[in-house]
Image: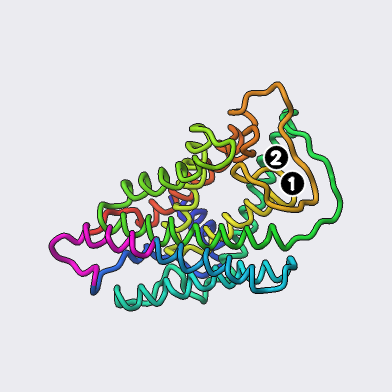
């Protein structure tokens, strides 16, 4: 027992770079105060915050993209400013409506936890591609140097804004309303099937994303009480997939890349991901879900998955 506790504490210390963990703060005051219909208030607040995050970031990024010089570095700056605007407005809204400073985006753990997340996301995707190449499922061809700004901007946008919307808002507030298990099921399903309209998407691809990212990224939030590791993992996965390997990212083109990775013909799409990309493959499903279940177990051991009173 002592060795198990030590290993768990050691894993958590490494994951958070010594920042410590705490249960997610679900909101207890003002609009989310205890009382009648708190579940309904939590759901209504989730909808309002969800659209606030979306409409504070994406339109601003588009506007800045047209106003700033049409170079890669400036487009990256537009994406970064849009992501920071979403975080700032979320913090202001939570402070006004919930009467608290949002611990889920606390600044002190930002850099260490974001760095750990970036390493984990890149390592996981590299592991997936190693499996693909090892079983002759994928061809990887080097293309040489390529501008990094487009891929970096898209990685920042998807990592920050999607994690804010799905984990800090949707998962947290459905958790506030109905408890963690319903919250995980709802947020994972919406995240997965939110990709169903993407190019070359299939039901299997949506299920893969729901299980891979829905469980794993939510588990990092449940364990640490913050979204920085989730943001890092999400951004690094997309960047590694789209820029370093040049594979399709959720059916889309991530811009210039230093390599080109394509599924070899003759294999079923559920094994390679097909045109949608490696994240809709069996190897990605196995790698990401395994990591997610391990982190969920750590969150369970820490007592972070109890239903709110």
Classify the position of the C terminus by image quarter: bottom left
Which residue sits at x=61%, y=38%?
276
Which residue is disc 1 drawn over?
245
Q: Secondary structure at mark 1?
A: loop
Magenta segment, prevailing SS (helix, strand or loop): helix
Question: How far across and how far down the image is residue 300, in percent?
Answer: 38, 51
Question: How far across and how far down the image is residue 249, in percent?
Answer: 63, 46
The vertical placement of 220 against 189, above or below, is below
**Magenta segment: does it hold 222?**
no
Provide the residue span drawn in magenta.
31-50
Which residue sits at x=40%, y=72%?
102
Horizontal side of residue 196 vs 153, given as left or right: left
Q: How many residues crowd mark 2 within 10 Å: few (<14), some (14–19), many (20+)?
A: many
Question: Colour scheme in the image?
Answer: rainbow
Which residue is disc 2 drawn over?
129
Q: How many residues crowd mark 1 within 10 Å: few (<14), some (14–19), many (20+)?
A: many
Quadrant in which residue 148 is drawn? bottom right
Q: Are marks 1 and 2 in contact (CB under 8 Å)?
A: yes
Residue occupying the far front of the picture: 66
Question: How far across and how far down the image is residue 38, in percent?
Answer: 20, 61
Quadrant in which residue 81 is drawn? bottom right
């Amino acid at each position: 027992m002592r060795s198990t506790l030590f290993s768990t504490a050691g894993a958590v210390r490494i994951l958070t770079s010594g920042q410590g963990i705490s249960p997610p703060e679900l909101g207890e005051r003002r609009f989310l105060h205890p009382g009648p219909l708190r579940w309904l208030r939590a759901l209504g607040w989730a909808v309002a915050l969800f659209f606030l995050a979306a409409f504070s970031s994406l339109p601003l990024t588009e506007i800045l993209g047209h106003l700033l010089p049409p170079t890669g570095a400036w487009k990256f700056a537009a994406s970064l400013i849009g992501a920071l605007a979403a975080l700032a407005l979320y913090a202001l809204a939570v402070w006004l409506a919930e009467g608290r400073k949002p611990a889920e985006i606390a600044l002190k753990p930002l850099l260490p936890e974001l760095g750990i997340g970036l390493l984990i996301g890149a390592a996981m995707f590299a592991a997936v591609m190693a499996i693909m190449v090892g079983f002759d499922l994928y061809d990887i061809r080097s293309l040489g140097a390529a501008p990094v700004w487009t891929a970096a901007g898209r990685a920042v946008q998807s990592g920050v804004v999607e994690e804010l919307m799905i984990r800090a808002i949707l998962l947290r507030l459905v958790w506030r309303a109905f408890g963690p298990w319903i919250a995980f099921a709802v947020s994972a399903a919406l995240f997965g099937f939110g990709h169903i309209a993407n190019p070359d998407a299939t039901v299997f691809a949506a299920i893969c994303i729901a299980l891979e990212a829905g469980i794993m990224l939510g588990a990092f939030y449940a364990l640490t009480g913050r979204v920085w590791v989730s943001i890092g993992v999400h951004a690094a996965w997309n960047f590694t997939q789209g820029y370093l390997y040049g594979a399709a990212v959720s059916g889309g083109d991530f811009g210039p890349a230093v390599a080109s990775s394509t599924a070899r013909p003759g294999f079923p799409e559920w094994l390679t991901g097909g045109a949608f990309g490696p994240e809709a493959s069996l190897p990605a499903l196995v790698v990401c879900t395994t990591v997610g279940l391990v982190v969920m177990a750590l969150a369970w051991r820490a007592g972070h998955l109890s239903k709110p009173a």
